[in-house]
Image (cartoon, rainbow, N blue to C red):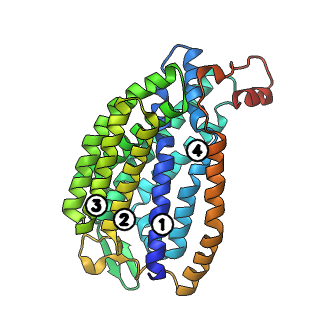
């Protein structure tokens, strides 16, 4: 295995981790208004309960994206440059949505005001819906191909924004959307108890059927159009995982259902990268214009230094994140959400609301 192949695999693993972990974060954010639809103050407490399920881990999950972006920039500079210029608008919208989401989650408890919290809830929703759709659109287009022309020594994106809106890419966006919604609903059911658990379980059971239809269609389309012989195995893994998730969700077995959606998402991302290899971006103008792991890679010395850094740092990061999940493994209920303090200083309100 060459270092170029190794780092292509590393980036694929990083995006797998990001979509599996951040996927349920997006799902929780998208479902918060629906599962928190009650009259005040019960509605606000339910929404706070939903957010509390990801409170200890959501920011750590975003580290996977930062690491993937950094590795992409350092290992395959040509890929990074062409993708971020060609997909400038969707990637900018994703970045803006993530910033809005971070601010909304962090600042929601800073002011004890109903209108303030409602606007923060809007920010959480926008910051979850937009990336959930656009990530699927972006990766589907990377595999399908976009107008890229090789102009020695650079690859130049010659299309526009509407080149990214095609039936296959839209189906890719719907796939990530419904997968993250299902993943998030199951996670809420897994992390809560009482009425919220029942509501989330019922919603997850319905969403899992939609995930089976949409994701299954996308996987088959991908395999028939861009797949290799051996990637049928990944299609089978994804299909079985989705079926397990559907059955487990119907039976209210949240742990098995969550494992099923996690494997299905991981298998789908792995399949996209497997179909793409050895390319990193496909040009619709012809194979001669494709970006590959070889014509976009950094120098051998750069890849060697990165490899040694990854060998020492990756186990530490994974161990810390696993420890954080273990510490916050217990379920929470509406009784664990404190009443919103009234008439207290802002600092006291923040402490009370974050417990």
Q: What residue is pinned by disc 3? A: 233
Residue farthest to the left? 224
Q: Is mark 2 in CB contact (under 8 Å) with mark 1? A: no
Q: Is mark 3 in CB contact (under 8 Å) with mark 4? A: no
- The residue drawn where x is 23% and y is 65% is 226
Q: What residue is pinned by disc 2? A: 273
Report the Cα–Cα distance between label 1 and label 3.
21 Å
Q: What residue is pinned by disc 1? A: 11
* Mark 4 / mark 1, whichever is N-terminal: 1
* Mark 3 / mark 4, whichever is N-terminal: 4
Residue 178 screen position, x and y as percent: 35, 40
Report the Cα–Cα distance between label 3 and label 4.
31 Å
Visible in this render: residue 321? yes
Name the element at disc 2: helix
Report the Cα–Cα distance between label 4 and label 1.
20 Å
Q: Which quadrant would the N terminus be assigned to in this image?
A: bottom left
Residue 342 screen position, x and y as percent: 74, 17
Name the element at disc 3: helix
User: Is disc 1 surrounded by few (<14), some (14 to 19) or many (20+) residues within 10 Å?
Assistant: many
Visible in this render: residue 159? no
User: Is disc 2 surrounded by few (<14), some (14 to 19) or many (20+) residues within 10 Å?
Assistant: many
């Amino acid at each position: 295995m060459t270092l170029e192949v190794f780092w292509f695999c590393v980036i694929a693993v990083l995006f797998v981790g990001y979509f599996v972990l951040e996927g349920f974060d997006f799902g929780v954010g998208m479902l918060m208004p629906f599962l928190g639809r009650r009259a005040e103050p019960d509605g606000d407490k339910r929404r706070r309960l939903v957010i509390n399920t990801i409170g200890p881990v959501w920011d750590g999950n975003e580290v996977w994206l930062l690491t993937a972006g950094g590795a992409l920039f350092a290992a395959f500079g040509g890929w990074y440059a062409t993708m971020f210029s060609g997909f400038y608008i969707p990637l900018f919208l994703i970045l803006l949505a993530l910033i809005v989401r971070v601010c909304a989650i962090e600042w929601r408890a800073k002011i004890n005001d109903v209108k303030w919290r409602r606007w923060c809830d809007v920010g959480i929703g926008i910051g979850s819906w937009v990336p959930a759709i656009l990530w699927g659109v972006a990766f589907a287009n990377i595999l399908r191909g976009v107008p890229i022309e090789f102009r020695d020594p650079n690859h130049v994106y010659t299309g526009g924004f509407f080149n990214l809106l095609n039936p296959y890419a839209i189906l890719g966006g719907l796939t990530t959307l419904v997968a993250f919604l299902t993943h998030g609903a199951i996670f809420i059911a897994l992390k809560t108890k009482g009425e919220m658990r029942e509501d989330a379980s019922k919603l997850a059971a319905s969403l899992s059927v939609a995930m089976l239809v949409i994701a299954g269609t996308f996987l088959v389309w991908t395999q028939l159009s861009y797949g290799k012989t051996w990637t049928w195995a990944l299609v089978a893994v994804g299909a079985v995982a989705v079926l397990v998730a559907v059955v487990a969700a119907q039976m209210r077995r949240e742990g098995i259902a969550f494992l099923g959606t996690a494997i299905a998402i991981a298998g789908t991302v792995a399949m996209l990268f497997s179909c793409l290899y050895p390319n990193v971006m496909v040009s619709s103008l012809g194979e001669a214009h494709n970006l590959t792991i070889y014509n976009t890679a950094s120098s051998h010395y750069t890849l060697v230094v990165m490899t040694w850094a990854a060998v020492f740092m990756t186990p530490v990061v994974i161990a810390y994140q696993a420890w954080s999940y273990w510490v916050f493994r217990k379920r929470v209920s509406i009784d664990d959400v404190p009443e919103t303090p009234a008439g207290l200083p802002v600092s006291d309100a923040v402490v009370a609301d974050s417990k």
